[in-house]
């Protein structure tokens, strides 16, 4: 047979598959109606496991794994279809609908905001991009920013979450696992790191450079060109600039912002020493209570999945079935648990879409733990 004849044969088989698929989904809908009437859960794990084993046993050896993948996706599609029929509203869906209806139509222009660092920190720059007028309260640790929100001391908090060069801010992710908060906004700001020192100091005079570990990572290529220079991490780039300004040494410099050069009266020894010019850091704005403002098209979730093969695939295939775009996936180990991980998802879909509602409804059934962090709009 030539290629055209083989393709014609494929077309005939595909037409049969389409017809059989539609018949299968009709039967699945009837099963969904039965479950709704009898108050049964959509997910029946034991039934799916038996079905997969039966299919595998009937298949030829070379197609066993392919059929498991195919039928796993079919099960996801069937469950998604049944969820629409059962239309069960979880407590979380009710909370989200309530937040949508009670949140003010305009994001606040002024607020009391918790930031990590001191004056001139990049978190302050991010804050000023989100709020026109803000009363910033600085804390020395990220954990205290979370605590200030949780205890009601500040209305909002600003935290760095990822950088386009250095990647995720893992310490923030680790704190997010056990903190109570909601993301209400995010913002991306371009980050330029400059080598700041006291006036009159030359590059050859520098024996030590101080900065935050993320800034050091983002400027690694420049730092590698310096010989015999000690690199010291501090809690914040603005703190680094202040340390240089207050030091009695002339052989110390900081990786920090141009704003800090002005604030702390430092000279810029070298500009933009980061590895890439398109160096961006993404910050999240958090609050204690759930707030969902108009235009929310990004959602952040944290999931604990079963420690078994295919657990992550089930979530990813559900996103695929619902045509929801996954824009970030991060995993972090959970302290005091052996080989268990918290998976952080950022997805892109409108908060008002039926696909979003279906996903939230279904995640409870396929996750050991599920935490909704918020739906929001990102300022660019």
Image (cartoon, rainbow, N blue to C red):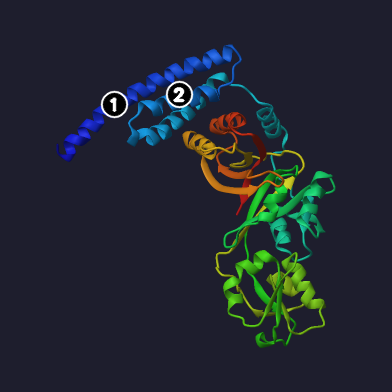
Q: Residue at point 58% right, 31% down?
A: 366
User: What residue is shown with label 2?
Assistant: 51
- Residue 132 is drawn in which quadrant? bottom right
At x 48%, y 14%, the residue is 30
- For the point 84% across and 45% down, the residue is 151
Q: Closer to the observer: label 1 or label 2? A: 2
Choose between 206 and 296: the one closer to the eye: 206
Residue 15: give its label. 1
Q: Is residue 3 left or right of residue 270?
A: left
Question: x and y percent of residue 248 in the render?
Answer: 82, 82
Residue 65 placed where, x, y %? 40, 36
Residue occupying the point 81% across, 79% down: 247
Q: In which quarter of the image is the C terminus?
A: bottom right
Q: Relative to 83, does residue 321 appear above or below in the rendering?
A: below
Is 209 drawn above or below residue 159 in the view shown?
Answer: below
Q: Nearer the viewer, residue 237 or 5?
A: 5
In the picture provided, is 350 more to the left or to the right than 173? Answer: left
Tell me the element at label 2: helix
Residue 342: x percent and y percent? 64, 44
Circle 1 — which element?
A: helix
Residue 145: mark in rendering: none
- How many numbered badges does the structure rendering display? 2
């Amino acid at each position: 047979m030539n290629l055209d004849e083989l393709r014609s044969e494929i077309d005939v088989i595909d037409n049969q598959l389409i017809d059989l698929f539609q018949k299968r989904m009709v039967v699945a809908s009837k099963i969904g109606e039965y479950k709704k009437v009898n108050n049964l859960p959509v997910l029946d794990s034991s039934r799916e496991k038996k079905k997969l084993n039966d299919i595998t046993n009937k298949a030829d050896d070379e197609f066993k794994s392919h059929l498991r993948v195919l039928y796993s996706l079919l099960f996801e599609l069937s469950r998604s279809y049944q969820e629409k029929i059962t239309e069960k509203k979880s407590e979380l869906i009710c909370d989200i609908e309530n937040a949508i209806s009670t949140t003010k139509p305009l994001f606040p222009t002024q607020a009391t905001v918790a930031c990590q660092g001191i004056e001139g920190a990049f978190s302050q720059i991010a804050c000023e991009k989100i709020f026109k007028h803000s009363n910033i309260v600085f804390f020395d640790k990220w954990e205290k920013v979370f605590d200030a929100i949780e205890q009601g001391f500040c209305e909002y908090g600003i935290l760095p979450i990822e950088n386009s060069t250095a990647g995720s801010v893992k310490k923030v992710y680790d704190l997010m696992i056990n903190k109570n908060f909601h993301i209400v906004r995010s913002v991306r700001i371009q980050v330029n790191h400059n080598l700041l020192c006291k006036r009159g100091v030359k590059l050859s005079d520098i024996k030590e450079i101080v900065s935050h570990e993320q800034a050091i990572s983002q400027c690694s290529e420049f730092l590698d060109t310096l010989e015999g220079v000690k690199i010291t991490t501090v809690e914040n780039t603005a703190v680094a600039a202040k340390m240089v300004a207050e030091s009695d040494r002339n052989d110390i410099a900081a990786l920090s912002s141009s704003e800090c050069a002005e604030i702390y009266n430092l000279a810029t020894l070298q500009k933009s020493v980061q590895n890439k010019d398109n160096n961006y850091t993404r910050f999240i704005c958090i609050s204690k209570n759930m707030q969902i403002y108009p235009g929310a098209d990004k959602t952040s979730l944290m999931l604990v999945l079963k420690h078994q093969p295919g657990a992550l695939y089930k979530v990813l295939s559900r996103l695929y079935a619902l045509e929801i775009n996954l824009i970030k996936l991060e995993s972090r180990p959970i302290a005091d648990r052996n080989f268990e991980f918290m998976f952080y998802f950022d997805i892109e879909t409108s908060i008002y879409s039926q696909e979003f509602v279906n996903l939230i409804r279904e995640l409870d059934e396929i996750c050991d733990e599920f935490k909704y962090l918020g739906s929001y709009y990102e300022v660019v």
